[in-house]
Amino acid sequence: MTSKEALFNYSLRLGDTSVILAQRLSEWTGHGPFLEEDLALTNIALDIFGRAKALLEYAAKTEGKGRTEDELAFFRNDREYFNALITEQPNGDYAKTIIRQALIDCFDLAFYTELAKSKDETLAGIAAKSIKEITYHKRHSFAWVNRFGNGTEESFNRLQNGLNEIWPFVGELFEMNEVDAILIKEGIAVDLSALKPNWEKEINQLFAKANLVAPEGTYVQHGSRNGLHTEYLSYILAEMQSIPRMHPTAKW
Amino acid sequence: MGVINFEELFESKLAKNDIIEPKDWMPDNYRKHLIRQISQHAHSEIVGMLPEGNWITRAPSLRAKLVLLAKVQDEGGHGLYLYTAAESLGTSRDEMLDALLTGKAKYSSIFNYPTLTWADVGAVGWLVDGAAIMNQVMLQRTSYGPYARAMVRICKEESFHQRQGYEIMTHLAFGTPAQKEMAQDALNRWWYPTLMMFGPPDVESPNSENAIKWRIKRETNDELRQRFVNQTMPQITYLGLTAPDKNLKWNEAKNGYDFSEPDWTEFKAVIKGNGPCNKERLASRNKSHSEGAWVREAATAYAKKQNEKYEAA
């Protein structure tokens, strides 16, 4: 694998993870539990779509075959998508959406803070902009985890159930392959193993505050680094890509 | 010092084009009229999130997704300031929501029509937001301060939305034959419902004297409808599309277009709850509200516990 190929795959991985997460979050728009939360979650989805667009633009440029960010988003199949499995999991109830978001926000803030120091100027620039946004997202999701954990019995139970469902997909966030190895050597990619201790510390603190228990003996689901997904992704793509695929020559 | 006659003071403020603020004395019927109008307007924004929200997950480009999400979010924001403006008159959000969810309160009937293709997202922005602006521009100078101020911001954002809707239509109308066909079909379906947004013909809707006096209304339904047609026709021509009305033609004598009246029987049917999507829209609002009940309860319980802790400390 050349370093250009590695950079293309790395940008796709980050871009796809953002597209699919934002796509899931935007399913809540107009259907939130109350108006203020509807607006907040839509705002978060907007930030993440914005990041996705920038990352896929860079992926397209890195690939250098004349494809656009929209062609990458709307004309690749699920086996060519590299988004983390956690992002494609169904929203479930609001507690599951929130706990998924908190786990991802905690990872993303650490990740993009490191990526902002990358030797790749474009990735570093996108990361620097994202830090501010993710800081707000994390404050929002952490506050809700705390509120659900210490709210009513029902909110606590829903939160714990949501965590149980999403937990098998968390470990994959820290997985690295040849792509990471090549780019870490060049000072471009983030060493994910270095992020783990602090992520665990913060998540354990959050769980303690919200009385949550991390499920034990969970088997870690993985595959997205190789374009292997859960059954949910092809449905997300079928919906998201339907119009461009019906009108492949059209501009929007 | 003489006795202050509140009613005279109120009337003299209106006569001077002064603004009425929440703490000022106001007659009961003024308060009631405003609560009804502002809360209906807020409900329209909230229900209005649904037909366009229907296309968020299918917007055909990343940019289109960002624009549409931001637009639907703006509508939610409009709903929020309008509910707040209505609350300043002494009603509560819960009361207003209850009226919406039980079907007691009205919202704009236009949102009871379905969005069937991506072109409908363009047509709604272009035509529906265009008509809404025409209705709402005069409310920026309405007599009740919180409403007038909310409307200044809302009108700015609405005119942005209208341009975005027209931009979508432009891409379609100058795109592939299938795209152009989609644009024409959307125009055909949204034209008459949009004309209905200005309300029944003047002969059936004598101007409420109060609405004029309170600076809530300045032009009649028919005047606004005529202005909308005059403004929109050149845009339709530019797009190379055709309005679905054989009688539509320029009338030099009146310096405006002649056009056919919408089907007012349909208008009344939709208002009565028999439009294509009345039931779906209300069901969707009720579903989100009832599924969100435990979230709101948790937030309240948490806040209560925090207060107790704070007081105990």
Image (cartoon, rainbow, N blue to C red):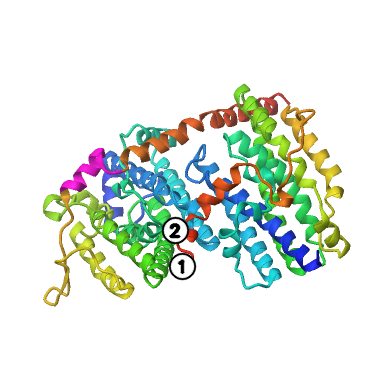
How far apart in space, not on screen, are marks 2 and 1 (Cα)? 35 Å
Could you tell me the amino acid type at mark 1?
Ala
Determine whether B152 is above or below A26 in the image.
Answer: below
Q: Where is residue A82 in the image (x, y as percent from the top left)?
A: 69, 53
What is the x, y in percent for residue B89?
38, 41
Quadrant location, the N terminus of chain B: top left
Secondary structure of residue under mark 2: helix
Near-viewer residue (A121 or A67): A67
For the record, the magenta segment spans B265-276
* Residue at 81% across, 53% down: A177
Is residue A169 at all visible to an observer of this figure?
yes
Residue A65 magenta: no
| Picture layout, residue A154 above or below residue B217 | above
Q: What kind of element bears circle 1?
A: loop
* Residue behind mark 2: B153
Occupied quadrant, residue A16: bottom right
- The correct choice, above or below, for B302 with respect to B133 in the image is above
Which residue corresponds to the image point at 66% horizontal and 25% vertical from the top-left? Answer: B308
**Where is mark 1, residue-wise?**
A250
Considering depth in this image, is B158 or A247 the residue closer to the camera?
A247
Nearer to the camera, A15 or B158: A15
Q: Are marks 2 and 1 on the same chain?
A: no
Which residue is nearer to you in this view: A200 or A90? Answer: A90
Q: Can residue B5 be seen in this view?
A: no
Q: What chain is tagged by disc 2?
A: B
